[in-house]
Amino acid sequence: MSLPFAQIDKSTGRVIGSTRYMNIEKTHHRVEIGSTWIGLEWQRTAVNTEAKYLLMQHAFETLGCMRVELKTDSLNARSRAAILRIGAKEEGIFRNHMITSSGRVRHTVYFSVVDSEWPEVQARLERKLNSRDVAG
């Protein structure tokens, strides 16, 4: 099960990206945030940081999650860096995790934020959003 969210530029009404809750596990109080894409013009802006902040805030504070997961292809250095910048911890690599549409064997890097880490991650993201220091 997944729950997609469109990211809309308020000034133009234009869709600029999308992200979603995935692998929703009510029994285990966890959710994955993923399948994110952001238009080139809005990459390395506050768009991704704000979306991750809002989704994690809702996951921890409304849904009562113990864990939010994020994952990416091991070859996607930009995505890996972005996930680390928001405050998630790298947990490891699932080797030979899946076969991509091109036939390449993908290794997947797993990251997470757990409920005890949320206050620190939340404060970090709020500082970034307030200063608009989203790239670093």
Image (tube, rainbow, N blue to C red):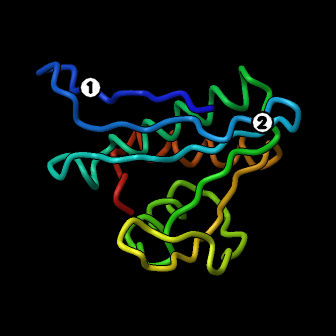
For label 2, count other residues whose C-alpha is less than 10 Å away and answer few (under 14), some (14-19) or many (20+): few
Q: Nearer the viewer, residue 22 or 55?
A: 22
Q: Is residue 7 left or right of residue 97?
A: left
Q: Say which amino acid is labelled 2.
A: Glu
Above or below, 70 against 90 in this view is above
Label 1 element class: strand
Which residue reaches farthest left? 12
Q: Which mark is residue 8?
A: 1
- Judging by the rendered image, the residue that carries numbered circle 2 is 25
Identify the image quadrant of residue 59.
top right
Q: Three-letter amino acid code at disc 1?
A: Ile
What residue do we see at 65% from left, 65% from top?
110
Foreground mark, 1 or 2, reads 2
Judge left or right: residue 4 versus residue 60.
left
Q: Residue 56 in the image: state x and y as whole percent.
A: 61, 36
Name of the residue lying farthest toward the right: 27
Q: Are marks 1 and 2 in contact (CB under 8 Å)?
A: no
